[in-house]
Amino acid sequence: MTNDQSTSKEDILKQIVLERLRQTSPTFKVALGSKGGFLHKEQLINEVTKDTNLGRKIVDIQKRYLESLKEGII
Amino acid sequence: MAIILFSRPDHDQIITYLYMHSRELVEYAKQKSHNVLNEERTNANKGRIEGVIKKKRPDLIMFNGHGDERTICGHNNQPLIELDKNHRLLRSTIVYCLSCKSALELGKKSVEDDTTTFIGYEDDFALGRDTRYDSTPSKDKLGNLFLKPSNLLMKSLIKGNTTGDAVEKCKSKMREDISKLRTSSEQNEQDALPYLLIFEQENYVL
């Protein structure tokens, strides 16, 4: 796989995650680790859009969830 | 009768959530007639925690708080236990650490002496909540999805079950909840699923 193809796959995943986050309930908040406190929908989207460490973690968590669904783990 | 130490700081949003949800554990341990040492809020500081561990030699310790690979923190994120500084204080105890990443280095090093058991997390832990219950966290069904299994784990340890059994009970409860939530019509619950899954997968007994 070339770098271009790899980047494209990451971008697609990011778009899927952002679309999932846009559906998030306005009353849902989540804390991930010690930093940042509880984050609401817009903050989660912002972290992913800006590609911060936390944003990449959110993408990874959503990816693992989607893989678990696909593989029938949950 | 076991000696059980709780370190329960209460200084920011996340830690306050843990503080409130762990209150029932302190009561539960008392009901079971254990000798309960509850160091909460400002008392969850290094001087007191070190002193209590040295003097009372608890059988079981629960730490709530922030932390990282090498550190468990208390009130205002003051380091309580640090790898290669005072982690040997945990020798010959069962430790349950609701603190980010503590299982990675601190936990691994702590169990090298074969008399210590360490249950902790290898990654940042995730904690969801429903903002409609900001003033009544104990009624927050979403928050309970994350913390009830953890409380189940600790109650199991308080009852004297093995650490392996306690962790399995916790994970089993989370898997059961995850399975139920998949068909939930509540958007909040659907939103929580990916984070619950991570929480369930990153909990380890060493």
Image: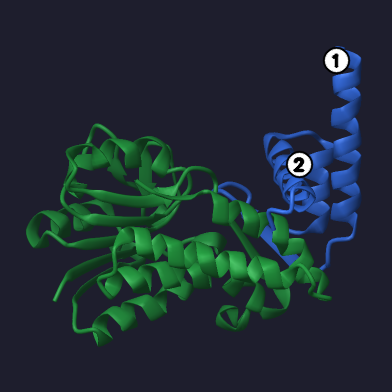
Chain colours: A blue, B green
Looking at this rendering, what residue extends furthest in the top direction? A2
Residue A3 falls left or right of residue B48? right
Q: Earlier in the sequence, mark 1 or mark 2?
A: 1
**Residue under the point 77% across and 42% down:** A47
| As drawn, A7 above or below B48 | above
Closer mark to the observer between disc 1 and disc 2: 1
Q: Which mark is residue A1?
A: 1
Q: Which mark is residue A59?
A: 2
In the rendered view, tell whether residue A35 sits above or below residue B174.
Answer: above
* Badge 2 amino acid: Val
**Mark 2, chain letter?**
A
- Residue B9 sits in quarter: bottom left
Q: Is residue B133 left or right of residue B190?
A: left
**Of all residues shown, which one is farthest toward the front?**
A72
The subunit carrying tag 1 is: A
Q: Residue at x 84, y 76 (%)?
A: B185
Distance in Å between CA atoms under marks 1 and 2? 21 Å
Query: Quick one: A62 or B161, which is closer to the camera?
Result: B161
Give the answer, above or below, for where B149 lies relative to A48: below
- Give the label on residue B199, or none: none
